[in-house]
Image (spheres, grey):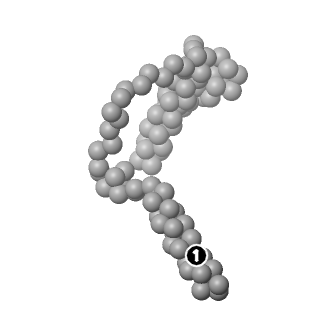
């Protein structure tokens, strides 16, 4: 009886280990440059307030990145800093275009 219980436990552990090993994502494709494709394109509809806020966030992200690169080079762009301030205020107070 003890041998049967031990055998069952051993197979249960092996099956669980195999299941966990199969569920891990394949990191080689995203980091190795493998092509990820979608066989069926899908449309995503977003409400206008969310889309406007997303546009503001995307623009703010790009402007902040450019500002960071310029800051590393020692360049100060006053117009860009003003745009950053305006974008932050629009996001903070919900005043999208």
Q: Residue placed at 48% from the left, 57% from the top? A: 23
Is residue 12 positioned above or below 22 on the image? below
Which is nearer the eye, 23 or 37? 23
* Position in image of residue 14 (x %, y %): 51, 72
Q: Is residue 46 left or right of residue 92?
A: left
Q: Residue placed at 35% from the left, 57% from the top? A: 28
* Position in image of residue 68 (x %, y %): 48, 43
Which is nearer the eye, 76 or 15? 15
Q: Quadrant of the C terminus?
A: top right
Q: Residue placed at 47% from the left, 66% from the top? A: 18
In this view, which residue lies farthest toward the right?
Answer: 93
Q: Visible in this render: residue 54? A: yes
Q: Secondary structure at mark 1?
A: helix
* Position in image of residue 40 (x %, y %): 36, 29
The quadrant holding residue 85 is: top right
Is residue 96 positioned above or below 22 on the image? above
Check disc 1 and report the residue beneath it: 8
Which is nearer the eye, 41 or 67? 41
């Amino acid at each position: 009886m003890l041998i049967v219980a031990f055998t069952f436990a051993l197979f249960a552990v092996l099956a669980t280990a195999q299941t966990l090993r199969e569920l891990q994502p394949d990191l080689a494709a995203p980091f190795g440059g493998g092509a990820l494709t979608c066989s069926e394109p899908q449309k995503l509809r977003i409400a206008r307030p969310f889309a406007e806020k997303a546009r503001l966030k995307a623009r703010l992200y790009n402007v902040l990145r450019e500002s960071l690169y310029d800051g590393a080079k020692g360049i100060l762009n006053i117009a860009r800093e003003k745009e950053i301030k305006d974008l932050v205020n629009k996001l903070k107070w919900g005043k999208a275009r």
